[in-house]
Image: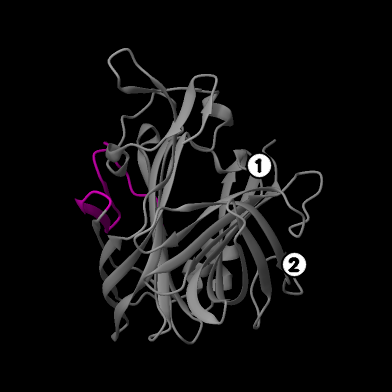
Amino acid sequence: MSKQDGIEHVLLEEDDLMHEVEDASNYNESAYYNFFDSSAAVGGWVRIGNRVNEGYAEVSVCLYEPDGSAAFQFKRPKIQTNDAFAAGGLSFEVVEPWKHHRVVYDACFLTDPKEMAEPREAFKANPQVPVALDLDWYGRSEGWGGEPRRRTADGGWEPANAGDPEKLAARGHFQQTGVVSGTVTIDGRRYELDGQGHRDHSWGPRYWQNMQDYRWLTITVGPEFGLMGSIFLAPDDPDESKPQSASGFVYRKGQPNVEIDRVELRTEYDDDGGDHRGCQERITARLTAENGEVFDVTGEVLAVVPCRNRRGGGVTRIAEGITRWTCDGHVGYGMTEYLDQLSKPE
């Protein structure tokens, strides 16, 4: 929680549930879960973004197999309410806020996940095969994040710093580290998952084109330790290795989150310069916590799906890479999400 001009960045217990819809046409409420099992070398992520004022949801599912292939689906099914995250065959159920969630879905299969750089061609070229996803996701860390809020006369909270919805990317946001169990079945190949994961939840007006280029790292090393770090790149000097606007947290079982306030990152790119993927130790990062602790990690990106969003001539690429992380001799899994604005709206 931080204070400025009477405004505090506050996370409430009820933020794990659905929020009241604002009048802004681009209001978005979204939830995202990732999950990994190191013994099975299987993982993935799912997301629903309810754009109820525009009449549809953004539904994404991506599952990574040990051979580097991915099962991927993206849909924009119609919705009429923001009562729940349930659209296009994907559903998230809050069984117990902050402690237990359920994730269920089925999707299509892409043999080459990099083909998603051109989604229309990718879906035409790849076969449809059955996929079943049935997971229980259990929160372990405290929630990290919140929304700018101000105290009311009755002791409650009200939103603050509304801002121009045409220029916003989110108003409220939180993240949490957890563990996951369940099954993933892809074209008859069944995987039992008993691993770790990370999730986030955002609400408020959003255009992807309003975001600054960023790098987001989620690192889970067993059920008792995890890291999250993000940096926003300076538009006039997009050098990942320089200290920039950074945030994140350290999770240790049974302890409060520790804030991360510095992230230094170096990424070796493919020859095409588009995605972050490749061989071992292609990503190196140093995350520094506010208490002075330093965490040096290396990442091997195993497979990437380059998702894309267009609006008014602007093109945003969000590259999602399943990553094998090494931290202090321990190996875990997580995601590297790199957002780049390839062109601005006209």
Task: Identify the residue shown where x is 22% and y is 53%.
Answer: 93
Can residue 22 be seen in this snapshot? yes
For label 2, the crowd category at 10 Å Cα-Cα, with few meaning under 14, some 14 to 19 and many 20 or more, is few
Q: Amino acid at mark 1?
A: Gly
Task: Identify the residue shown where x is 51% and y is 80%.
Answer: 330
Foreground label between 2 and 1: 2
Whether 261 is drawn above or below 118: the answer is above
Whether 58 is drawn above or below 41: the answer is above
Task: Please report the bounds of the magenta region as a residue range.
Answer: 75-98
Describe residue 67's horizontal placement relative to residue 156 as left or right: right
Taking depth in this image into account, of 11 and 24 the one nearest to the observer is: 11
Describe residue 220's horizontal placement relative to residue 328 as left or right: left
Q: Is residue 187 magenta?
A: no
- Label 1 sits on a secondary structure element that is loop
- The residue to which callout 1 is attached is 313
- The residue to which callout 2 is attached is 273
Q: Which of the marked residues, 2 or 1, is nearer the chain's N terminus?
A: 2
How far apart marks 2 and 1 lie (CA) works out to: 21 Å
Q: How many dots with numbers? A: 2
**Please, which residue is most extreme toward the left here?**
95
Taking depth in this image into account, of 129 and 177 the one nearest to the observer is: 177
